């Protein structure tokens, strides 16, 4: 989840978006599977 | 009984003539009152200086993209709208060049890429995005990072061409281009499908610097003070480029909409959703049909 920002969050709150992407790109990320 | 012949009585004929004359005059006036596109090139601020700007060719024209870094590939795909381009991600993607090969492209119809004078469809966008991705040699398929309608488009792409995608990271995806209260009425959709009138509205009103600034402050950002002059300049200049109206009007007219729910059921690639806390606690079902999937968002 991103803390703030509207539909252009990448311009409005880039630090929050970078942190969210960083978390998703961690090599130890566990991928959940939908059933 | 013999069918009645439709006859125009002389007393009605002059009214029809005047009506046709007025309509013709309006159409001619709209055509000649069209504001010409800008001759200004897109500002350099569209991409960070350390990135190299390059071109790939697709069946609908050239795709302009910015590239830097090495490692696992990350491809950033911008949302669509007035003056949309890779600039949307330009404050984010430089942070990843230390560990990734980073690519940020302008979709066909937007930014510095080809802007064909045609009514684009979502299928056209998927096809050209697939052609763009296929033109690279990847060590492993890229992770796609996308927002809004383009995030939905990447789901569409991943269902048609799963070999081109390793994972999806999506910010507020949808299949219509609408977001919450900013969805368009049936009348507005009809208006944006009316060829000359829609172009007139776009060139003379929607793409002006003041309109772009208003749209950014009112609809695109939650915090209006965060909108800078640079953002307004880059986005308005992109919006005013020759033929920039075609893709945006296709979007506003609903021509780029597609059934995201059907696509989600076919998705075989991992997907992460990013959603602003200022919106709903979880994606709005009307925008992102994810019954059952939302349980995963709440999982630790």
Image (cartoon, coloured by chain):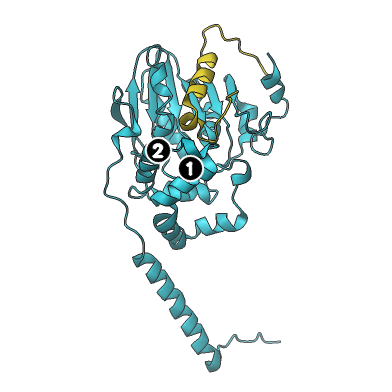
On the image, the x and y values in percent for residue B78 come to: 45, 33
Which residue is disc 1 drawn over? Answer: B216
Disc 2 crowd, CA 10 A, few/some/many (<14, 14-19, 20+): some
Chain B colour in the picture? cyan
Vertical placement of B19 versus B85: above or below?
Answer: below
- Point out residue B96 in the picture as x, y percentages from the top left corner: 41, 17
Residues B144 and B9: in front is B144
Q: Residue at x 50, y 15 (%)?
A: A22
Q: Are marks 1 and 2 in contact (CB under 8 Å)?
A: yes
Q: For this rendering, which residue is in front, B221 or B15? A: B221
The residue depicted at 30 percent of the width and 38 percent of the height is B43
Chain letter for the part of the structure drawn in yellow: A
Q: Going from the N terminus, do you reach mark 1 or mark 2 first?
A: 1
Residue B85 is marked as none
> Which chain hosts label 1?
B
Q: Quadrant of the C terminus of chain B?
A: top right
Q: Nearer the viewer, residue B219 or B176?
A: B219
């Amino acid at each position: 989840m991103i803390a703030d920002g509207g539909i252009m969050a990448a311009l409005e709150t880039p630090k929050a978006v970078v942190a969210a992407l960083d978390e998703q790109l961690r090599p130890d990320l566990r991928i959940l599977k939908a059933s | 009984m013999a069918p009645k012949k439709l006859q125009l009585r002389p007393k009605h004929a002059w009214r029809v003539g005047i009506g046709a004359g007025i309509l013709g005059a309006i159409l001619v006036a709209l055509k000649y009152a069209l504001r010409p596109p800008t001759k200004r090139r897109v500002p350099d601020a569209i991409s960070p200086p350390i990135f190299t700007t390059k071109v790939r060719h697709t069946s609908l024209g050239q795709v302009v993209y910015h590239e830097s870094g090495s490692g696992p590939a990350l491809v950033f795909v911008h949302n669509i709208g007035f003056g949309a381009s890779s600039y949307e991600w330009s404050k984010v993607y430089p942070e990843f060049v230390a560990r990734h090969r980073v690519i940020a492209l302008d979709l066909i119809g937007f930014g510095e890429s080809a802007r064909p004078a045609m009514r684009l469809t979502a299928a056209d966008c998927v096809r050209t995005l697939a052609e763009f991705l296929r033109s690279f040699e990847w060590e492993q398929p890229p992770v796609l990072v996308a927002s809004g309608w383009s995030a939905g488009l990447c789901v569409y792409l991943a269902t048609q061409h799963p070999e081109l995608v390793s994972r999806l990271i999506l910010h507020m995806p949808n299949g219509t281009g609408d977001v919450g209260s900013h969805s368009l009425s049936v009348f507005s959709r009809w208006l944006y499908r009316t060829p000359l009138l829609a172009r007139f509205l776009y060139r003379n009103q929607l793409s002006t610097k003041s309109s772009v600034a208003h749209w950014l402050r009112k609809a695109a950002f939650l915090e209006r003070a965060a909108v800078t002059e640079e953002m307004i300049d880059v986005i308005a200049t992109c919006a005013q480029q020759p033929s920039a109206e075609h893709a945006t009007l296709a979007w506003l007219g609903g021509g780029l909409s597609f059934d995201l729910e059907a696509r989600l059921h076919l998705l075989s690639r991992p997907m992460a959703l990013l959603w602003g806390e200022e919106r709903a606690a979880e994606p709005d079902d009307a925008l992102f049909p994810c019954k059952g999937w939302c349980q995963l968002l709440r999982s630790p």
